Amino acid sequence: MSLYKNLFKQTLIYGLATVLPRMISFMLNPLYVDRLPKQEFADVSIVFAWLVFFNVILSYGMETAFFRFYNKQENKSSVISTASVSIFWSSISFLFLALVFRDALSTWSKINVEYVTYSIWILVLDALVIIPFSRLRAEKKPMTYAIIKIGNVALNLLLNLFFLVFLPEIATSNPDGFFNTIYFENFQVGYIFVSGLIASLSTFVILSPDYFKIDWKFDFKLWKQMMQYGLPILIAGTAFAINEHFDKILLDWMNVSKEDIGAYAACYKIGMFMVLFRTAYTLGIEPFFFSHATNENAPQTYATITKYFVIFGSFICFFVIAFIDLLKYPLVPKAIYWDAIKVVPLIVVANFFLGIYTNLSVWYKLIDKTKIGAYISIVGAFVTLSLNYLLIPKMSYYGSAVATLAAYGTMMIISYKMGQKKYPIPYDINKILSYLGVTILFSAVSFYIPYVRESYPIRIALSGIFLYFIYYNEKETLLKIINRKSK
């Protein structure tokens, strides 16, 4: 029992360390919308997309390889030292080369060279703490891990608030004071990257003592094994980055206006409701999947869990889409951004499909065929790139939203079809499809029919019908739970 209690405690802490930073980052969206013109919001979004992409490259699967070999090798100090030395020198090499060629990178990426410089330093500082963070997890120090992770994002949020909201007011009210010396007009985007840089530097300073504790010995044979293990992780991570973020870069490359990209990126964030639900669920349920893998009724358990994920996800999906005209006020507070609100239904449903795919992907993890996940992600990336290339010239950013939906839908279907052949799970397909069908139908009616979209009573009524539909289909289970509690 103590084993499961400890597992639950660590899962909860690591879950908070992952979900809370996402929530705090989510809070930055309305701040940026309020303080930035659309073209500058586009600049920030494009640079952030590149940051995600290069974060994957600079980690090159070493984090996952570290956990694998730390638990496998008897000489754990050798694993720590080899991984740390590898990340350190690859990061320093990238820093040197990127700074030397930053003007060329700026020209190639069409990003201001100043933002490129900030991004290079942020990337390197974040890469240098990969193994120290991994070591905290490996040595079962979840509280320290969570405090530093959450502290990083909280500091970033506070610095953004200070630089974008308070500093201009302080500098204006006291022109001869100290704060006026660090205030520059029309430098909002720069302050965003300065905030990120300070937060990353603070985290590195806290974790840098790890580099003084290692013996700096490099086991080349072990490193080769770790690299071979990490390569599929790098490929899968790159494919995921393409699916999740590369659309903003492609929109810029294909000469969509910065105003349109900014509006798209801001409204895209509303889909984060489904992302937060998916992330919290995944962190909590994956340990359960593996702990029940040897149970005789495991496939039935997985099927039931997936069905209830679809139930909860369906209602969240419908609620966000049906009440988007309320949610847009706190999340995207400027009306000039709302011309891209039409992408929200596609992005929310796309993230819902990705959540279902995450559930379905349990089969290849249980049979130790994780490479299949990389292959499926590559297929998704191919769909993303192909459809963006075909649709952006005709549909602008709406084409990117369609591509995202198609990519995640394709990954979901492939995983289901392959999984039923390799590790059959008795999913209640009829009910799952009925929930998906009702979600898409009610969402479409609520969003695309003007009379319904303008009537809150009708949308509230549809919510009630949806809940009754769920109750009608699941009343036997619900009544069992109620009767069990009453006893």
Image (spheres, rainbow, N blue to C red):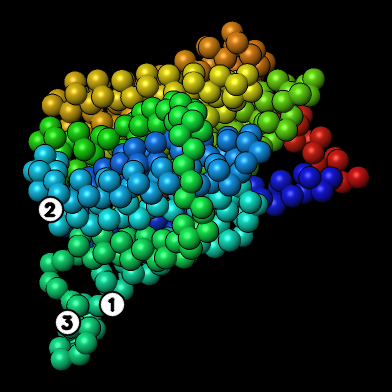
- In depth, the one of 485 and 199 nearer the eye is 199
Does residue 231 appear to the left or right of 366 in the view shown? Answer: left
In the displayed structure, 247 sits above or below 126; it is: above
Q: How many marks?
A: 3
- Can residue 362 be seen from the camera position used here? yes
Q: Where is residue 198, by image quadrant? A: bottom left
Neighbourhood count class around disc 2 (C-alpha, 10 Å): few under 14, some 14–19, many 20 upward: some
The disc label shown at residue 113, or none: 2
Q: Given contact means CB atoms under 8 Å apart, are the residues at marks 1 and 2 in contact?
A: no
Image quarter hosting the N terminus: top right
- Can residue 430 be seen from the camera position used here? no
Q: Given contact means CB atoms under 8 Å apart, are the residues at marks 2 and 3 in contact?
A: no
Helix, strand, or loop for circle 2? helix
Does residue 9 appear to the left or right of 256 in the view shown? Answer: right
- Residue at 68% x, 31% y: name it: 290
Helix, strand, or loop for circle 3? helix
The residue that mark 3 highlights is: 181
- In depth, the one of 36 and 118 nearer the eye is 118
- Residue at 65% x, 52% y: name it: 140
The residue that mark 1 highlights is: 166
Position of residue 369 measured from the top left corner of the image (x, y, whole percent):
56, 19
The amino acid pointed to by label 1 is Phe
Position of residue 122 measured from the top left corner of the image (x, y, whole percent):
31, 55
Neighbourhood count class around disc 3 (C-alpha, 10 Å): few under 14, some 14–19, many 20 upward: few
- Residue at 66% x, 16% y: name it: 425
In the displayed structure, 442 sits above or below 215; it is: above
Helix, strand, or loop for circle 1? helix
Task: Please report whichever mark, 2 or 3, sits nearer to the chain's N-terminal start.
Answer: 2
